Image (tube, coloured by chain):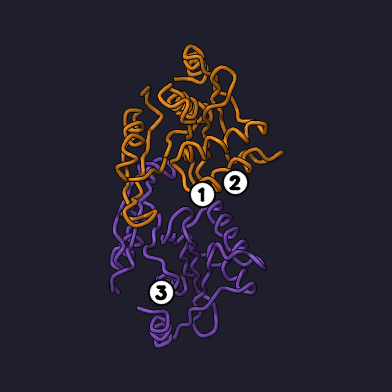
Chain colours: A orange, B purple
């Protein structure tokens, strides 16, 4: 699915995916805190990536997107090319404000991120998530979107909180 | 195995493991190029991590060790705490000059790195390597040292060059 078609689809859903801008930073901070999924340290790291990605004249190491519903930002995604690889990208963060969960905003961001990566010759997206029961919905979200489990490390984040590694090959027409 | 015992063992082998210093940078650059395992980009990234780790007043994000044989640096290792985890570390680089391969210098660095991580309360080390046949010796090196394969991503680095993810739990007495 190319970027144009993804945008049209999101538009039909009443959403716009667009590059994140400096004025969105407050909304991003609020949704990271409101969604309840992230620790204080995770929020801090997420905001550092946002600040680096927004920096004037930055090399664009991090790509950032916002999803707008009725003119207000309700979600964002952060991704970047993976160092030392030819065509692998990492999807670092997708966050949707609790008020907009279940609207398809997360799906719009995921499709937009994949189309963006494909447009730049990227061939796969890797992402890391948590193995705990409370992340089962997140894992299903990615599995339904064609992501395959490719790694698992017990107690990686902390005792009882495993790393689950997912990867999606973008070369085929899989949407 | 604690750091003192690791040092004694390396010493009996005629080696000294010690923190990498600014004056070692030339030797590191030379061994990265001489060992033939790294692309130009990999050498550049490895040296960037070395420079960040050596920076005065740095937060010590990267820990760097050198192994000396008869007073000359023949190998180095680079590792760091893994962001957003409580007690996981990544071993980013072990490089031994071709002149010193087969001497046990790589093993001395690996044991020193593990003892260093244990001393700081680290409970596991994760590392990434390549799935190609030419890396079979590297993979066996880590497997013999107690590292388990915990992930695999096809064509991750480039077509035909997979990611293999290894992890070693340090909590038990495994050396």
- The chain identifier of the residue carrying mark 3 reads B
Q: In this view, does B175 lie to the left or right of B36?
A: left
Q: Which residue is found at the position 41% from the left and 30% from the top?
A: A170
Are the residues flagged by discs 2 and 3 in contact, CB closer than 8 Å? no
Name the spot of residue B25 as percent of width and height, x first: 61, 69
Q: Determine crowd level at label 2: few under 14, some 14-19, many 20+ residues with C-alpha closer than 10 A.
A: few
Residue ranking furthest to the top: A12
Q: Earlier in the sequence, mark 1 or mark 2?
A: 1
- The chain identifier of the residue carrying mark 2 reads A
Q: Which of marks 2 and 3 is in front?
A: 2
Answer above or below: position of B174 versus B82.
Answer: below
Q: Determine crowd level at label 3: few under 14, some 14-19, many 20+ residues with C-alpha closer than 10 A.
A: many
Residue A71 appears anywhere in the view: yes
The one of B33 and B116 positioned closer to us in this rendering: B116
Q: How far apart are marks 1 and 2 (CA)?
A: 12 Å
Task: Give the image quarter of residue B159.
Answer: top left
């Amino acid at each position: 699915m190319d970027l144009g078609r993804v945008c049209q689809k999101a538009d039909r859903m009443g959403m716009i995916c667009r590059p994140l801008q400096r004025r969105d930073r407050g909304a991003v901070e609020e949704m990271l805190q409101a969604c309840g999924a992230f620790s204080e340290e995770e929020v801090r790291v997420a905001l550092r990536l946002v600040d680096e990605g927004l920096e004037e004249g930055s090399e664009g190491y991090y790509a950032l997107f916002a999803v707008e519903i009725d003119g207000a930002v309700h979600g964002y995604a952060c991704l970047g090319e993976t160092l030392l690889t030819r065509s692998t990208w990492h999807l670092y963060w997708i966050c949707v404000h609790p008020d907009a969960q279940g609207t398809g905003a997360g799906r719009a961001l995921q499709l937009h991120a994949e189309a963006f990566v494909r447009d730049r010759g990227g061939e796969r997206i890797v992402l890391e998530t948590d193995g705990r029961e409370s992340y089962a919905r997140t894992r299903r979200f990615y599995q339904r979107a064609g992501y395959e489990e490719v790694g698992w490390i017990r107690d990686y984040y902390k005792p009882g909180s495993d790393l689950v590694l997912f990867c999606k090959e973008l070369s085929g027409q899989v949407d």
